[in-house]
Amino acid sequence: MKSRVFFTDLSSTPQYNLFKKLNKLLLKAELKEIIDAGDLVAIKLHFGERGNTSYVRPIYLRNIVDRVRECGGKPFLTDTNTLYVGSRKESVSHIETAIGNGFDFSVVNAPIIIADGLRGKSFEIIRTDKKWYKEVDIASEIYNADSIVAVTHFKCHELSGIGGVIKNIGMGCAALKGKLNQHSSVKPFVIMDKCTGCMRCIQWCPAEGAIVRVKNNPLNPPSIKGTNPITPFTKRDKVKIVSGVCIGCGECILPCRDGAIKIKWDADTSSMQEKMVEHVYAVLQGKKGKYIFITFLTQISPACDCYPSSDIPIVGDIGILASKDPVAIDQASADMVNKQHGNRNSKLLKNFEPGEDKFRGVYPEIDWTVQLKYGEEIGLGSRDYELIEVK
């Protein structure tokens, strides 16, 4: 039997605006069936890094919060602290960033609770017995919530190809140790001939000592592009990544403007995707019938919302999806993006025509279908779905 995925486009009228369409979408997707009176409902989302503008708007979250309250639930907005150094590294800065991006109680009508504690060390150990893990570490307040409403901004991702529900739940509900475990197989390296010594990667790296300066051959200094605003550098300096110190977060890849930092895409990203799926399995296995997924196909950016900026979307806005199957909704989201005309002014390098793989058009080396295939294999959901339009 095909999984049901509900969809509404973004067309609206003064009599029937997007909030009313979203309400009807939630009604058709049977939000009320996952919530019992008095349930503590975790609304899992990404608050957006400070400077990012492509995350799901707070006014939509207010609408979802109000529907949860109507069902008798007690909602709270939640996410986990980040592995990398940014404005969401620990709970104090994380909450300040969320409020700064518009997720204040007066706007969304729900409190913010960071699910893995002050510094990402509050977690529960969940038994999985899967290919990569026997057990995984899941953020405590995700584990302790009665129901989960996952609100996802669908986009490209520099390590997993797509950033959908599986990414939002698998990486986003893991505590610090769980994030480290998922990234453990990602090992970037530097192509020395391409490195120009700009040192941007060192500024971005969250692991002290993972990227270090090395002296270049004085007879063949690199060309200089830009300047380092923090630390002066010489024409002979380049960088290398210390594999024993690197935590595999991949945050050094996008800041490198010269394409000098690479990873072993097939091996590294495939295993990371499967590890991510096993964390989704851990989150959901104790909440059967108590979760739903809402995905926004808007501002479909070429990189994660973890960056303090938002680049030009690779396709136009499409609509909103809802489902109780995490694999089906991610598959449907990717299919709908790939049916669009690609934006030639974006980071899309190829595959501009409808039906062509837009995610491979941004990250040619990443097979983003690995996470969907593995999710289906372990019984997380189905790639076979029925798309039901809510008009």
Image (cartoon, rainbow, N blue to C red):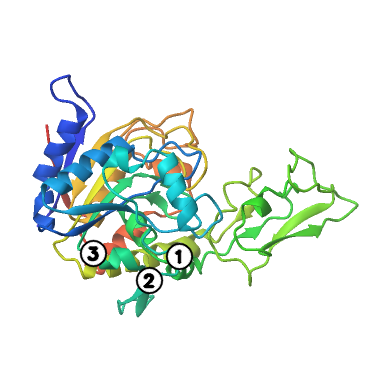
* Figure quadrant of the C terminus: top left
Q: What amino acid type should be assigned to the residue bearing mark 3?
A: Leu
Residue carrying label 2: 123
Q: Say few, some or many: other residues with alpha carbon within 10 Å of mark 3 (under 14 / 14 to 19 / 20 or more).
A: many
Residue 218 shows which numbered tag?
A: none
Q: Say few, some or many: other residues with alpha carbon within 10 Å of mark 2 (under 14 / 14 to 19 / 20 or more).
A: many
The residue positioned 18% from the left and 39% from the top of the image is: 7
Q: CA distance from mark 2 to mark 3?
A: 22 Å
Q: Is residue 188 above or below residue 55?
A: below
| Residue positioned most to the top | 14
Image location (x, y in percent) of residue 251 = 56, 54
- Can you tell which quarter of the image residue 317 is in? top left
Q: For this rendering, which residue is in front, 172 or 319?
A: 172
Q: What amino acid type should be assigned to the residue bearing mark 1?
A: Gly
Specify which label sits upstream in the sequence, 3 or 1.
1
Q: CA distance from mark 3 to mark 1?
A: 26 Å
| Residue positioned most to the right | 219
- Can you tell which quarter of the image residue 173 is in? bottom left
Specify which label sits upstream in the sequence, 2 or 3.
2
Under circle 1, the secondary element is loop
Q: What amino acid type should be assigned to the residue bearing mark 2?
A: Phe
Q: Is residue 48 visible?
A: no
Residue 120 shows which numbered tag?
A: 1
Frontmost of labels 2 and 3 is: 2
Image location (x, y in percent) of residue 347 = 50, 36
Under circle 3, the secondary element is loop
* Figure quadrant of the N terminus: bottom left
Residue carrying label 3: 380
